[in-house]
Amino acid sequence: MNAAQSIAAPAKEDLGIEAELRRARILLDVAERCASINDLDGVLHELVVLTSRALECDRGTLFLNDPATAELYSRVAQGNLKREIRILNTTGIAGAVFQSGVGLVIDDPYNDPRFNASVDERTGYRTASIACAPVRTMTGELIGVMQSLNKLPEAGESFTMLDLELLTDMTRQAAIVLQSLQNVERIGKLRAKEMAFLELVSDINSEFDLGRLLSRAVREITAMLDAERATVFLHDTATDTLFSRVATGAEATEIRLPSFAGIAGSVFTSGTSLNIPYAYADLRFNPAFDRQTGFFTRSILCVPIVNKDGRSIGVTQVLNKKGGVFSDEDEQRLKAFTAQIAIALENSKLFDDVQRVRTYNESMLQSMSNGVVTLDPAHKIITSNAASARIWEDDLRGRMLADLLGEDSQWVIERIDAVKASGVSDTLPDATVKLGTVTRSVNLTVMPLVAAESDKELGSMLMFEDISAEKRMKSTMSRYIDPVVAAQMLEGDTHDLLGGISAEATIMFTDVRGFTTITEEYGAQGTVAFLNEYFTMMVDCITREGGMLDKFIGDAIMACFGLPIPHDDDPDRAARTAISMIRELWAWNDVRKAKGLKTVDMGVGLNTDMVVSGNIGSPKRMDYTLIGDGVNLASRLESACKAYSARILVGESTVSKFKGTYRLRDVDLVVVKGKTKPVKVFEMLDYHTAESFPNLLDVTEYFNDGIRAYRAAEWDKAITRFDKCLSLNPGDGLSRTYLGRCEVLRATPPEGEWDGIWVMKDK
């Protein structure tokens, strides 16, 4: 007999009646015994016992094929444990039979190149002969191999073809049971995996803490996909960033990146998964994080997290599949997992947002210097912050407000009820309130509390500002100067600030044009109402830039930038204020015109100089004000606006200190009334629009050229330039003024040397 023999079909030898009966009994026994066993391990064990007995051999092994891994596997019982043996379905004698589908009888395995002798070397067992048969179902499907080793000496030296035929028939007899139990086991494993998956998802979905949820999700994803690292990013709509609280293997407690940046940003914005086998070959990958942490990213799987509305709320990113790259199956598993936990992630993020807002609000409430209490609809005090306890020297929580209010303070309840009825907050400045045994002068604000979704009444909130001596002074001063300036003055050395000092400042004077018509037509009450509205608007412009309102002079305003608190850009602050004053006045005029009311114009003068500030007056009556030549010049510049058809005139000392760039034109060299030294004056034009001043840049260029010709006594050239200005902007009053001057001077030239200086006769 040859060392290796094979069969493709049963042998045709005449076995004899007795041998045929034995064969039939063996096959019947296989069918009965296998049919009575309900688990795959039991059938594997029973077949090994039956085939070893029938073939009279030392041992046997039944291998089944695992299509998912392309491996042949068998199970060996060792006490109460089961050990699974797996080999590639292309290696060894078993692999050769499985690949060919043809059984083999081998008398001398060590001389067969397909035999793997390392198993004998490892176990100490010596294989002398082998019979290996394919395991096929009745339909011919190959599902494994059956291998018998070492024919017993008393039964013969080696396996025969009849042994191989019998082995083939025995395995075919049990193949249906094997395949069925294999499918049952596979379904059972899938079901167990599915149940474990559902249990995991259920467990994760019950978590509300965002940090713990992200940590758990990352841990499970890393294990599920056999990866080195995973990160779950959620979208923060407030900052349009992707953030994560946890990244396995990294020390960062929170990672934030723009919602469009990197691989995660690309997946989030596109809503499409990315499976990148080589990260450094993808231009969207940012290696900076690797350089920072020392981690080396090889492969990336990133999928969007989509909520029930189909909107992306984040991404899940997994790095470095162990032993290879991420497969399509990995991508589908990750998508399924993120789809299941998307609701939990969204709910946890909302819960986290609510908690952060609540914590922020509570912290803000406790840190407020004003007392705040909230009441339920029955006027029971629900919350009271630390400032409230300090003001009223008691913890007010849980008590009825009516029981705490003194007899003279029951009006507070009436105010609360009125606010509830109207739904509008109410403020009572400088009110005297008694709560318990404590009486305080407070600024009281009453606000309704209403649920945003249902408009259901929740109660009321009271805010108390305790008006101590310092706060009363601050409140009073804030009506005259910027509140920030008032606070700085009160925090510093009050004596020094309110004493007489000399400092550089930019002074502003404003005046209303057309005010006489207002007073004549509107009478006393209408005039006061007009001025109050006008002054409110102008003072807001001043305080926005940190200026100090010095005083109202009829319809005029005097303000200062640089005192009592200096800034490094006070001239620019004054310029921005003047520009915003004109613009807001024009907008106000549009509203008044639409209502059929009178409109007005205004002029502004700005000058920077050393001035003296301080208390001026008598011990019984003092006024904090500014004096000096620089103050007077600012007033003269405001008056000069009428003569030059301008709205904002600026002295050269102010222009020289500007840090910003403005649209200016050189107006004149002026000697104001009471002075002998000329001052260069500029007009500021930045408040204009293309409609209010057409061709502004061209007009400015021609005008400045005309001024140079005017000062050089080149009257014809100057007239030509000012004519050009008027052709570009017929409404330019200043060009018309200079055109008239030049025509007069050309007709009657000035005597002596012409210096281009204009002497003002009026203040």
Image (cartoon, rainbow, N blue to C red):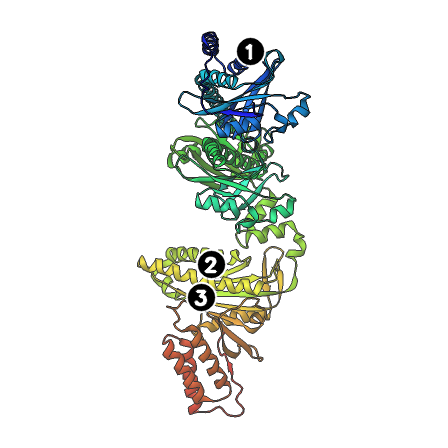
Q: Amino acid at mark 1?
A: Arg
Foreground mark, 1 or 3?
1
Secondary element under disc 2, as helix, strand or loop, is helix
Q: Amino acid at mark 3?
A: Tyr
Foreground mark, 3 or 2?
3
Position of the N terminus, as image quadrant, is top right
Depth order, front residue of 315/11: 11
Depth order, front residue of 459/102: 102
Whole-percent x and y of residue 516? 39, 65
Secondary element under disc 1, as helix, strand or loop, is helix
Earlier residue among tags 1 and 2: 1
Please tell me whether residue 191 is drawn above or below residue 471 in the rendered image: above
Earlier residue among tags 3 and 2: 2
Whole-percent x and y of residue 300? 54, 42
Asked if the residue at tag 2 contacts the one at tag 3, i.e. Cβ–Cβ closer than 8 Å, the answer is: no
- Residue topped by disc 1: 53
- Residue topped by disc 2: 538
Classify 10 Å Cα crowding around label 3: few (below 14), some (14-19), many (20 and above). some
- Residue topped by disc 3: 687
